Image (cartoon, rainbow, N blue to C red):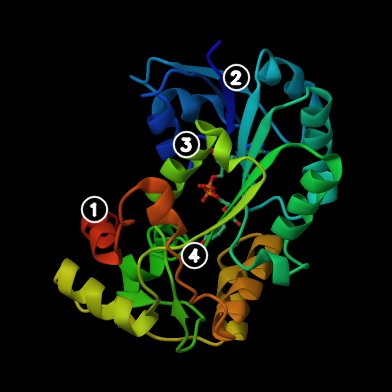
Amino acid sequence: MADKILVIGGTGNIGYPLIKYLNQQDVQIVAGTHNIQKAQAKFEGLSNVEIKHFDFLDPSTFEAAFDGVNKVFFVRPPQLAKPKQDMLPFLTFAKQKQIQQIVFVSLIGVEKNPMTPHHKIEQMILDLKIPYTFIRPSFFMQNLNTTHREDIQKNHDLFIPAGNARTSFIDTRDIGEVAGITLMNDKYLNQKLNITGPAALSYQEIAKIMTKVLGTPITYSKPSLLKFRKVMLKRGIKKDFVNVMVMLYLITQLGNAKEVTDTAAKVLGHTPRTIQNYIYDYQDYFK
Ligand SMILES: NC(=O)c1ccc[n+]([C@@H]2O[C@H](COP(=O)([O-])OP(=O)(O)OC[C@H]3O[C@@H](n4cnc5c(N)ncnc54)[C@H](OP(=O)(O)O)[C@@H]3O)[C@@H](O)[C@H]2O)c1
């Protein structure tokens, strides 16, 4: 019988490319979605996607979303920063349902950072003994057209507190495809995959590449962590989310975001996308 896969976060950066990938495979897809209207618009035209309401914070939505499901993919929504409160009820439910594989988007270097929510979530899955695949990506290229878009669009500036450190950015379209492949192949069970893009770049280098591809000068103002935090809070971004970002950019400044691995290439069977590919494909976001 074909797998029935519950995808949580299917409207997001990774979940959407994953849904598109799975839609080409012989599987049943349940998109467990938080905002139903957004999901209906996003998945229009994808014939094999059943939309069901799902909210990590509302256990009454779990039973229907898990109906007949044997595998689960999820991301931790960035605003949910308290794993025990936000994620443990869902994970305990997945255990009760005897899920055969849970694919979780974690974070590269997570084993060295016990304070991150990702570390705590991985540990909960291990403690519950649910068969897992942990996908541990480096920083997303798509942070530029989401979190940092406003500064690029309005001020033509990368307002990012990463100092001179280098980062091995990965495109979330590749992460979605890696997730899809791991869901279709038992050999990735109980594996931790540290995936990155093909190169580690500084934000000075990214500004130069953006300038070239977009045909508009883009600067890198290199704010301090404190200044970045202040500006983000003033913009109304939730404190928990801002604090996680500050922690991750501190880790970057310490040189912990520059490791390049060939794991994504091995899983995908080809080199993952470069930052040039990404900026070209997303150029309209920055205009
Ligand atoms: N950014 C990076 O560089 C980076 C690097 C490594 C790891 N990560 C991790 O990757 C994860 C984010 O992945 P992403 O960028 O694909 O996420 P995303 O685009 O922000 O999407 C979040 C998804 O979660 C859903 N969601 C929000 N609240 C929910 C709730 N209460 N219950 C169920 N679903 C809910 C959203 O649905 P709606 O659209 O319906 O609200 C959306 O589909 C985070 O855990 C982050 O820490 C990020």
Q: Secondary structure at mark 4?
A: loop
Q: CA distance from mark 2 to mark 1?
A: 31 Å
Q: CA distance from mark 1 to mark 4?
A: 18 Å
Earlier-in-chain disc, 3 versus 2: 2
Circle 2 packing at 10 Å, graded few (<14), some (14-19), many (20+), is many
> Residue 98 in the image: x percent, y percent?
78, 24
Residue visible at 45% across and 22% down in the picture? 40
Q: CA distance from mark 4 to mark 2?
A: 30 Å
Are the residues flagged by discs 3 and 1 in contact, CB closer than 8 Å? no
Q: Nearer the viewer, residue 158 or 180?
A: 180
- Label 3 near ligand 1 (CB < 8 Å): no
Q: CA distance from mark 3 to mark 2?
A: 20 Å
Residue 10 drawn above or below residue 209: above
Q: Nearer the viewer, residue 17 or 191?
A: 191
Earlier-in-chain disc, 2 versus 1: 2
Which residue is denoted by mark 4 in the rendering?
139
Q: Residue 180: which disc?
A: 3
Residue visible at 78% across and 67% down in the picture? 114
Q: Nearer the viewer, residue 183 or 28?
A: 183
Q: Secondary structure at mark 2?
A: strand
Which residue is denoted by mark 2 in the rendering?
52
Residue visible at 38% across and 47% down in the picture? 268
Q: Does 206 sit left or right of 266 as displayed?
A: left
Q: What kind of residue is marked 2?
A: Lys
Q: Residue 281: which disc?
A: 1
Earlier-in-chain disc, 4 versus 3: 4
Q: CA distance from mark 4 to mark 3?
A: 19 Å
Q: CA distance from mark 3 to mark 1?
A: 22 Å
Earlier-in-chain disc, 1 versus 4: 4
Residue 211 drawn above or below residue 42: below
Q: Does 12 sit left or right of 218 as displayed?
A: right
